[in-house]
Image (cartoon, helix red, strand yellow):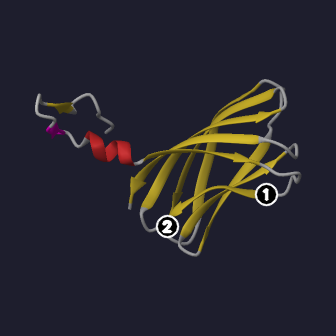
Amino acid sequence: DFTINAIYCDKFGKIFDPLSGINDLKNIIANTLTTSTTTANQVAMLYSSTTYRTSKVLLQITSGTSYQSSELLVTHDGTNTYMTQYADIYTAGSSLGTFDASISAGNLNLLFTPTNATTNVNWVRTGIAV
């Protein structure tokens, strides 16, 4: 449930949040990865695997004048990661890179292997707590 329209403030500045919309907003995180001059896999995002079990990630990938939009669902059991990629749209006719996930040192790592050396990955992640 993602509800923010029920949050309101009275004339004295007191915030009312009857449906816990503020907690939903705390679980939305955005960032950018700019890959270096390599096509080796790189950590695009990491987060505590003890805090979040499942995440939905909206991606926008840019390489030169080529663009890709994708979505990922990622979950884990504390040891192994499980991921599906869907809703892929490519302006260049092919993927700008591949994604994988792993757990290391208590963190879930989302790995990106770019097709081209210099690539930007913008993402927004919504996490569901363990």
Left/right placement of residue 116 relative to residue 100 reads: right
**Are the residues flagged by discs 2 and 1 in contact, CB closer than 8 Å?**
no
Q: What element does badge 2 sit on?
A: loop
| Quadrant in the rendering for residue 4 | top left
Q: Is residue 18 visible?
A: no
Q: Reply above or below: 99 against 120.
A: below
| Label 2 sits on residue | 77
* Mark earlier in primary sequence (2, 1): 1
Q: Position of residue 29 (x, y in %)?
A: 49, 46
Residue type marked 1: Asn
Residue type marked 2: Asp
- Region rendered in magenta: 14-18
Left/right placement of residue 22 relative to residue 15 reads: right
Q: Residues within 10 Å of mark 2 (few under 14, many from 20)?
A: few
Q: Which residue lies at the image location 53% right of the left edge and 60% below the top edge?
A: 47
Q: Which residue lies at the image location 88% right of the left edge and 54% below the top edge?
A: 38
Q: Residues within 10 Å of mark 1 (few under 14, many from 20)?
A: some
Q: What element does badge 1 sit on?
A: loop
| Label 1 sits on residue | 41
Left/right placement of residue 45 relative to residue 24 reads: right
Q: Position of residue 85 (x, y in %)?
A: 64, 43
Q: How many marks?
A: 2
Q: Position of residue 22 (x, y in %)?
A: 29, 43
Q: In this rendered view, identify the residue nearer to me: 35 or 126.
A: 35
Dominant secondary structure (helix, strand or loop) of the stretch shown in magenta: loop
- Tell whether position 90 is magenta: no
Q: Residue furthest bottom?
A: 105
